[in-house]
Image: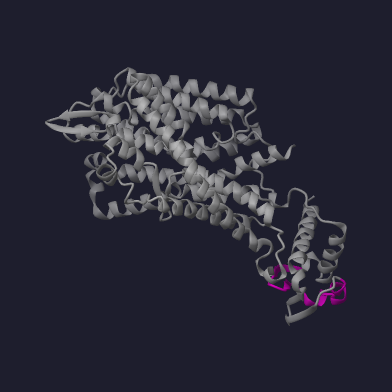
Amino acid sequence: MSNFKKNFQSFGKSLLFPISLLSFMAIFLGLAAALQNKNIIATLPFLANTGIQNVLGLIRRLAGLPFGQLPLLFAMSIPLGMVKRDKGVAVYAGAVGYIAMLMGMSYILQVQGLTSATTSVDYLMQNSGLNQVDATLRNSAFTNVLGIFVYNTNVIGGIIAGLMGVYIHNKFRETELHPSLTFYSGKRFVPIAAALIMAVVGILLTFVWPVVNTAIIAMGKLISETGLFGVFLYGFTEKIINPTGLHHILNQTFRFTALGGVETINGESLVGALQIYLYQLDNQLQFSTQATQFLAQGKILHMVFGMPAAVMAIYHTALPEKRDRVLKFFLAGVTAVILTGITEPIEFTFIFISPILWIVNAIFAGLAFLVPALFGAAIGNIQGGIIDWLVFGVLQGAQTKWYLYLLAGPVFFAMYYFTYKFIITKFNVMTIGRRESDFTEEDEELQGSVSISQDDRVIAKQIIEGLGGLENITDIDNCITRLRVEVLDASKIKEDLIKKSNPNGIIRPDRNTIHVVYGGRITKIRNIVDNYVYELRSQEQH
């Protein structure tokens, strides 16, 4: 198998770490949010109890953890899944690199005079002469991540940092600096390199990302001017750009600016699809289908019917012996998407490994918006799960045409299922459960080969055998000049054998600790010892 294919498969599997957390937390997030919904509380008054609401608020806050920090989770999970050795160092470098990238980006934005204050909607309208639509579009391009003001690169930023973390780790893990800087050599140099390199990446993104934002803004204006085709285009665009985080720009402008509609109701001018809908809901007025066409009604067919069908297709195309594990893996994600409309735990398992499935997913999402709009549905809110269908559809009466989904839903289910199944089998898409290695418990850290010269192997062998063999060693570390080793049985140490590696000295600070002094050679010695230990453990596994 080519290195590219191996790396690509490792990349796909590494995404399952944050996705698993995401799907589990999504259930609690959705349920807690639903039980804090004023319509649900009106139906079940006991939920209004302050203690209950405080508990639900805490659950909601904790369950939102992976959603707020998803880019950082990707930055750490990709090295965790792709790096074969010293995974902890790689994960640390991924996190350091991501933060450095944000700081590099933030610094250039500050130099350009772009801050939270100068990009607020009010400031832009008052000082830059922008109208509300353009000011909101501009404002939506920015966000605060870990308290750092940056362009909203969402999970794409995390993926960039994660992949660069893998590259930087593999490139610099055995770097030997000048003897005066030995302490910073080897694995310690990896996060240092990550900080330096990723700061530059962040600076570059500051000039690249506005081009992408401009394209989204142009798309938003096109959507608002093209009628029903624009409704399809809205659903398609929102889904195709979802991994970038730029869908928030699209959503915010249609929900809160004139692009989403302008209506005068009871003498009050309302701007934006969500604001129009919420006013009508609060005042028990007829819902505007022109407003709701950009809201939850466009997501229900995709989320409640489409995503479970996609999972069924993935399940049926998996290897027979893997299907039980596939079902268990997706159970939380399917529950979350049906209840709350959170699709990422399912979509992120395939959109990064198959451009075809990604595009088809976006086309079907566009159709899910178009069909309800064609038949005049009127279901608002923003999530799109079955809770929205019940609360903002069924409970609001026949005017919402909630019954359309009972007819169109099975059609969408079949459309998703057969299309996904065909694409997966036709193009051999490696969705979960189609690889022999999926769900295996083997230690991937011990897979692969290691490059070590014969001369280095002789030195490493002398050291390891002199320390009593691999089974006698509990820990290996180093400082600026010494190899620090913890052993189980000090009587097994053979100093004469260790001395063949030409150390500057041997120190025995306590019964189970030995320090072998190599001076400026320590980085080189530590690397060849690590490589030799890795080689021995790989051989033991086979």
Q: Is residue 498 magenta?
A: yes
Asked if one can make out residue 4 in the rendered structure from this viewpoint, the answer is yes
Give 168 or 130, whichever is nearer the viewer: 130
Q: Looking at the image, what colour scheme do you see?
A: one colour
Residue at position x 34%, y 31% from top?
296
Residue at horizontal 60%, vertical 46%?
163
- Counting from the top left corner in percent of width and height, residue 35 is at 31, 44
Label total for image: 0
Can residue 80 be seen at all in this image of the molecule? Answer: no
**Front-most of 390 and 431?**
431
Q: Locate residue 419 relative to residue 478 in the image: left or right.
A: left
Residue 382 drawn above or below residue 531? above
Specify the quadrant of the image occupied by residue 29: top left
- Note whether 240 is above or below 453 in the view shown: above
| Quadrant in the rendering for residue 301 | top left
Q: Which quadrant of the structure image shows residue 367? A: top left
The reply, left or right, for residue 466 in relation to residue 214 is right
Task: Give coordinates of residue 23: x percent, y percent.
Answer: 47, 43
Q: Which residues are magenta?
A: 473-500
Front residue of 270/129: it is 129
Q: Residue at x 85, y 70 (%)?
A: 501
Residue in the foreground of this view, choosing between 309 and 259: 259
Viewport quadrant of the N terminus: top right
User: Does the stretch in magenta take in 89?
Assistant: no
Percent of width and height locating residue 409:
41, 23
Q: Position of residue 230 (x, y in %)?
A: 37, 23
**Measuring 24% from the left and 32% from the top, which residue is drawn there?**
277
